[in-house]
Image: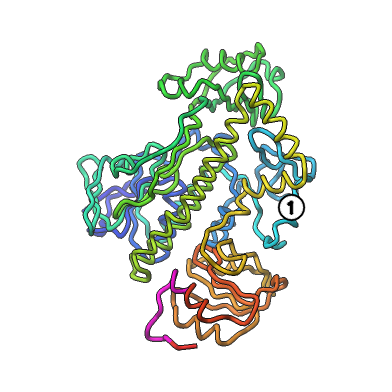
Amino acid sequence: MKVTTENGNPSQHPATYDVIIAGAGPVGLFLACELALTGCSVLILEKAGTPHSPLKQLPFGIRGLSAPSIEALHRRGLLHALEVPKRLKDPFGRSGNEALPHPGRPVGHFAGIPIHQGHIDTSQWKYRLPGASPTSLIAEMAELESVLTRRAETLGVTISRGLPITDFIQTKEVVTVLSGDLSFTGKWLVGCDGSRSVVRKSGGFEFAGTEPAFTGYSVKVDIVDPEKLKPGRVLTPRGMYFQSQPGYLAIQDFDGGAFHRAGQPVTLERVRQLLRHISDTDVTISALHIATTWTDHARQATAYRNGQVLLAGDAAHIHAPLGGQGLNLGLGDAMNLGWKLGAVIQKNAPEALLDSYHAERFPIGAQVLDWSRAQVEIMKPTPNAHALHAILRDLVNTGDGATYIAGRLWGVHMHYDLDGVHPLVGYSVPAFAFEDGTTPGDVMHDGRGLLLDLTNNSELNTFADEYAPQLKYIAAPVKERLGINALLIRPDGIVAWATDDTPDYNALREAAARWFVVNRASRINI
């Protein structure tokens, strides 16, 4: 079989791939990298003929990365490759090389209400150590995709562009994917093909949720008299507008999503009239260069798996892009699914491990959808919404309010219910600082789990040998261990077991058995 690869040249490929991924956006690319780390053969089919799009360029392509996404990129050695966060002055007034923004500067928002750095009390985040990755960064979609594409190709992933998935047929063993007259065979298919996912629709997934309240517009225009528009994010009695840079506007018109649903072209006259209506000014637009529409419809697949087919990213959940949660939610799906599906394919875990993907990620997605809905409700141009907005603004201007909301928006509080006794179980591993200055994230680039021994217990080394090579053992003192003696860490950086005392090996073995397979040849009873 021959297909066209990223560089446009025909190339010979396996008759059957381990995984076929629909969509070469950040989610599909990151998932492909995770699968390739486990030794899987991966094919990405992307409908667009080129990765370049005006909407991915600055500032439309600017996205905020939250703590889990930043940690995930760091744990795979990818964060350092992103140059934009190091040099880009973001819409909130920070530059990538500033350790801390000015206390009075906003570092985020909820429903357009700014969250100020000076109100956030990071001491409430007990397990975030001083050496942790930033809680938020500004990234550029085009650069992020470029970095992930290079990594995927280095790991042997095949990326074929200009090949939209038109249908698929699955059996208990394989999935046959169709792209026009071409067909491709994989053991598994993952839909990362966006909000209008063909994989989701063809796969019979239920997509439940709520209807939109507004049509959103992202436009690049020439403004004759920009001084007539207020800077930043402006809520008005008729809607909202936001100017991130001169001429780049986001506008929300609370029309119930009617304009977006109608599929009408966005014209210069439409944008001119709409902006004047929303801003209540006579501002003049002389040219329209780029325009797209979007809405706040909030939907989520009721199941993330159907047989040999899975969903991730916008294919599994859609919502308003307020706060940039969509990209982060999708990257989290990829990080959670990749090592699990890879372990199942490589016979390092039973297929039942995949049940934990939906069990863990569905509640996280549902929370994000609810937070998105709440923001939309508060932003509506109604007296009731204005009253709620005023009350919430007062709460956000308090230390506890700002700290809680920032922690939720930045994913600091993200937690999986893993039924562990220790309070860290289900949370991201803290950034313990080893004596050489490295952290656990620096030693996870190979995608394996860790048994982290902070007290040099030789019996833990023996235990880790039972699970080699899936699990590697690291014994090293750290600068601040928070009273913890040892931790079992999944490949995605989530703590599966921890103890402040002498290890209970029965509890440790029970925790390890959920995520790893014993190497029978090295099994030793402790």
For residue 504, above or below residue 409: below
Residue located 51% across and 63% down the image: 418
Kind of residue indicated by mark 1: Ala
Q: Residue under label 1, please give it.
A: 99
Residue 354 in percent (x, y) is at 38, 60
In-image side of 76 versus 453 (left or right): left
| Quadrant assignment, res 109 | top right
Name the one closer to the observer, 68 or 421: 421
Determine crowd level at label 1: few under 14, some 14-19, many 20+ residues with C-alpha closer than 10 A: few
Mark 1: secondary structure: loop
In-image side of 191 versus 397 (left or right): left
In-image side of 516 versus 77 (left or right): left
Residue 253 in percent (x, y) is at 55, 22
Residue located 72% across and 44% down the image: 402
Quadrant of the image for the N terminus?
bottom left
Residue located 44% across and 36% down the image: 209
Residue 130 in percent (x, y) is at 72, 61
Q: Which range of residues does the magenta coloring cover?
A: 512-523
Task: Find the residue positioned furthest to the top.
Answer: 282
Name the one closer to the observer, 220 or 112: 112
Name the one closer to the observer, 306 or 229: 306
Looking at the picture, the colour scheme in use is rainbow
| Quadrant assignment, res 497 | bottom right
In the image, residue 183 lies in the stretch drawn in magenta: no
Residue 224 in percent (x, y) is at 65, 15
In the image, residue 519 lies in the stretch drawn in magenta: yes
